[in-house]
Amino acid sequence: MEKEKLVIIGSGPAGYTAAIYAARANLNPVMFLGFPSGGQLTTTTDVENFPGFPEGISGPTLVEHFHKQAARFGTKMIYEDVIKVDFSSHPYKITTAEREVLADAVIISTGAAAKRLDIPGANEGELWQKGVTACAVCDGAMPIFRNKDLYVIGGGDSAIEEATFLTKFGKKVYLVHRRDELRASKIMQDRALNHPKIEILWNSAVIKVEGEKVVQNVTIQNLQTNEVSKREAGGLFFAVGHTPNTNFLKGQIDLYDTGYIKVEPGTTRTNKSLVYACGDAMDHTYRQAITAAGTGCMAAIDAERELSARGLAD
Ligand code: NDP
């Protein structure tokens, strides 16, 4: 079985940044890109908040740049999903459907997936990405949403953050929440409750989305009275939480109940030495491409230091 100094699992901004830094530190990183590779950026349209691209850049193109940069410094890329890890003895064992490799150090950057709801009309092949999205911060500034009534589903901090963000573009933003009480923090609640362009539809659910080429209507059901109303809409945004892609790590490293990886505050160190976590798999607060890239850099530096200290870096 081949032994590597450093294996990186996952290929979003966190994984690629870790690879760039690790490759430049001569750690000869091997990266399992996963399938499909590239992470959440590959399903976004324009990225306008990643510094360095004043005109914006498409998500897939940004990932392509990351990939080329990581490859340029010698990262070995493997297009396979890691299905199992064994951190019970060192060197650690990483398993895909095709191979097993041993690694002195492992960086986990498997990201998270925004949860979506199975609403008629909102799925792939219907209006998904045609006015239905799961990331207002990524997609909200698109022209199709300008001066339209926009609907956000959820009652947590994300939902309020997204609704507030969307007030810059939409005519009015409706927050559709299934209960009569928000889960969001008090300060965020106040923001939503006091905002002239946000209206909360309590005890409500979106039960249908319709439109010719893009979203034109949503149907809302009041869950207490069962009353149904069809309304004009320019967009529907899911803000019902994220699921980190960490199932394969259960029992191997410490995870929160929500599945996010626990790290020592201010570092990327997990409870296993020489195992690091970065990006959305460990960050449930910021979840931006640039913060993922930042923690990817931290993971590579943390790994390089610990490998060197143990005489494993050469
Ligand atoms: P949360 O899990 O906090 O909230 C998810 C929301 O979606 C809840 O209101 C939930 O309703 C609703 N929901 C879940 N499933 C469904 C469903 N099937 N149908 C309808 N509604 C549903 O996720 P967030 O992404 O909002 O937040 C995650 C974490 O990130 C939190 O710790 C949050 O504090 C943090 N965060 C912090 C921010 C900040 O401080 N600026 C910004 C964004 C996130 P219900 O309440 O009824 O369960």
Image (cartoon, grey):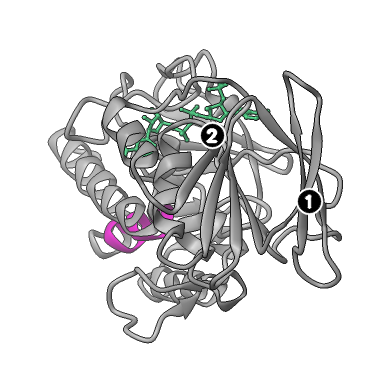
Q: If you read the primary sequence from the N terminus, does the residue marked by circle 1 or circle 2 appear first?
A: 1
Front disc: 1 or 2:
1
Crowd tier of the residue under label 1, counting other residues whose Cα lies within 10 Å: few below 14, some 14–19, many 20 or above: many
Residue positioned 53% across, 24% down in the render: 249
Is 208 colored magenta in this rendering?
no
Which of these two is toward me, 149 or 140?
149
- Which stretch did the figure color magenta? 13-22
Could you tell whether 67 is left or right of 291 in the image?
right
Name the image quarter holding residue 129.
bottom right
Q: Circle 2 sits in a helix, a strand or a loop, which is it?
A: loop
Mark-to-mark CA distance, 1 and 2? 17 Å
Which of these two is toward me, 137 or 235?
235
Task: Name the mark on residue 30.
Answer: none
Residue positioned 54% across, 73% down in the render: 146
Residue 2: image location, x then y, percent: 53, 43
Residue 176: image location, x then y, percent: 60, 37
User: Which residue is labeled 1 in the image?
Assistant: 122
Could you tell whether 123 is left or right of 313 in the image?
right
* Residue 96 makes an appearance in the image: yes
Q: Is residue 162 above or below residue 176?
A: below
Could you tell whether 150 is left or right of 127 in the image?
left
User: Which residue is labeled 2 in the image?
Assistant: 241
Marks 1 & 2, CB-CB < 8 Å contact: no
Crowd tier of the residue under label 2, counting other residues whose Cα lies within 10 Å: few below 14, some 14–19, many 20 or above: some
Residue positioned 40% across, 68% down in the render: 70
Which of these two is toward me, 101 or 230?
230
Residue positioned 65% across, 44% down in the render: 81
Residue 42: image location, x then y, percent: 59, 64
At label 2, which amino acid type do we have?
Gly
User: Within 8 Å of ligand 1, the CB of disc 2?
Assistant: yes
